[in-house]
Image (spheres, rainbow, N blue to C red):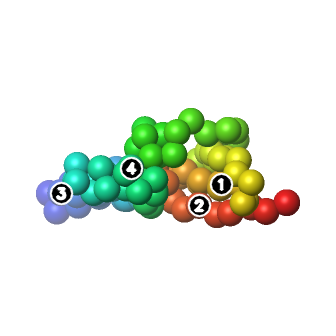
Amino acid sequence: MRLLTMSLIVVGLLLPAAASAECRVFTSSELRQAIIKKTIKVGMNGADVKRSWGEPTKVRHSYPGGDEWEYWSPTGDQIVSFGPTGCVTGWRTARD
């Protein structure tokens, strides 16, 4: 019985960490370099993306997944995808 109780506690501790696995903590130097170069990285949160690229032109909310932020550009719109935890999972260029 004691072994079962301890197993449940360990599983309970692992679940929240797995759910936020896509978020990443960057050093201040890494963030500063990305912002200066106007780049974004997988794992950034929304505030970091805004510091690098500014306010998005359009936001699409998605449930249960994450949002998509669109940045309009003459060379092709940049679409940034966020996971359910609010961190960047990737981005792509959309051309009309």
Question: Cβ–Cβ below 8 Å for labels 2 and 1?
Answer: yes
- Given residues 41 and 60, the one toward you in this image is 41
Residue at numbered disc 4: 35
In primary-sequence order, the first of circles 2 and 3 is 3
In this figure, which residue is indicated by the disc labeled 3? 6
- Which residue: 59% across, 54% down? 81
Task: In this rendered view, identify the residue nearer to me: 89 or 49.
Answer: 49
> Which sits earlier in the primary sequence, circle 4 or circle 2?
4
- 21 lies left or right of 95: left
**Residue 45, percent from left and from top:** 42, 45
Give the secondary structure at mark 1: strand
Q: Are marks 3 and 4 in contact (CB under 8 Å)?
A: no
- N-term mark: 2 or 1: 1
Q: Quadrant of residue 48?
A: top left
Q: Residue furthest left?
A: 2
**Measuring 22% from the left and 54% from the top, which residue is drawn there?**
29
Name the residue type under label 3: Met
Amino acid type shown at disc 2: Trp
Which numbered disc covers residue 91? 2
